[in-house]
Image (tube, rainbow, N blue to C red):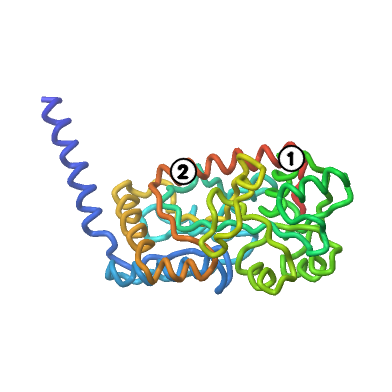
Amino acid sequence: MWRVRCACAALWIAFAAQSTAQSYPAKPIRLLIPTAAAGGPDTIGRAVAQKLTDTLGQTVVVDNRAGASGAIALDLGRLAAPDGYTLNIFSVSQVIRPLLFRAPYDLERDFAPITQLSAQSYVLMTTPSLPANSVSELIAHARANPGKLNFASVGQGSQIHLMTELFRAMTKIQVVHVPYKGIAAAYPDLFAGSIHFSFAGIISAQPHIKAQRVRALAVSGPVRMKALPELPTVAEAGVPGFAVTQWYGLLAPAGTPRATVDFLNKEVNRALQQPDVAGRIAAEGSEAVGSTPQQLAAQIKAERAKWAKVIKEAEIRGEE
């Protein structure tokens, strides 16, 4: 008799999961974005939301909740019902933040990964007056002048700060960190030569590269960028193993039914493959990706370990 009951229970669970998958979505979906309107995550989120609205027959409502470096949006997401009707876009910056500051969320505990949405390399560039036309020449010049070169970042503990600390550690150079409130504020000093080098996003860097106000040396990701195919990766240019990207992913609250997560994964990945969505993402300097939930979970874990090690070894402290 117990075998019959177990078999019936298994059939009921399978039926319930199938029923949930078939009925979802039955109402609008809220997509929480951790920034104000305009800019990378908002553009990517709106492109995906519009495509899902078209294909699912339910509106995907974009809800911009900027503040606290993404913590406000993620806190709303983690407290939402785990039913697939509240989703979060997040970035590697939200992986880093809890390593430096108190945060109300834990990405691995509080959320169910759905898919990686996009990835973008940074550009390594120098002031034109620096006698360095390649990554190897920059390293050699820094080694010959320990402590005399400086680099810009967009703030203490930012990804640009941490990735430059990683670059410094891997190349064994001594350079000075100069934080700015944004990369736009650093450009005049980079043009003038009071800042020697920096990593920056392609959208902000490309006009200055074309105008030769800065000298681009390499890109930070594991492969060359379609927008700047002539530039090698930092790894190709002499720092094997160096690979850093800015990327965005999609999450649901922990406990969201697996059938719903799998459904969203399939539909969002399909949306990312559409030329109009991929084109809008490319216009932001990124490339559409798409992954499995398991791959995104592994990526979150790997990023956390990577940046925790950099923070510890460089003795970085968070500064609000």
| Mark 1 vs 2: CB contact within 8 A | no
Disc 1 marks which amino acid? Answer: Ala
Secondary structure at badge 1 equals helix
For marks 1 and 2 on the same chain, the one whose residue lies earlier in the sequence? 1
Give the camera-side residue of 226 and 12: 226
Question: What mark, if any, has residue 297 been given in the picture?
Answer: 2
Disc 2 marks which amino acid? Answer: Ala
Question: What mark, if any, has residue 169 been given in the picture?
Answer: 1
| Residue 320 visible in image | no
Position of residue 72 in the picture relative to residue 293 (left or right) = right
Position of residue 272 in the picture relative to residue 12 (left or right) = right
Label 1: few (<14), some (14–19) or many (≥20) C-alpha neighbours in 10 Å: some
Q: Where is residue 116 in the image (x, y as percent from the top left)?
A: 45, 53
Label 2: few (<14), some (14–19) or many (≥20) C-alpha neighbours in 10 Å: some
- Would you place residue 29 above or below residue 313 in this image? below
| Residue 216 visible in image | yes
Q: Where is residue 224 in the image (x, y as percent from the top left)?
A: 54, 54
Q: Quadrant of the N terminus?
A: top left
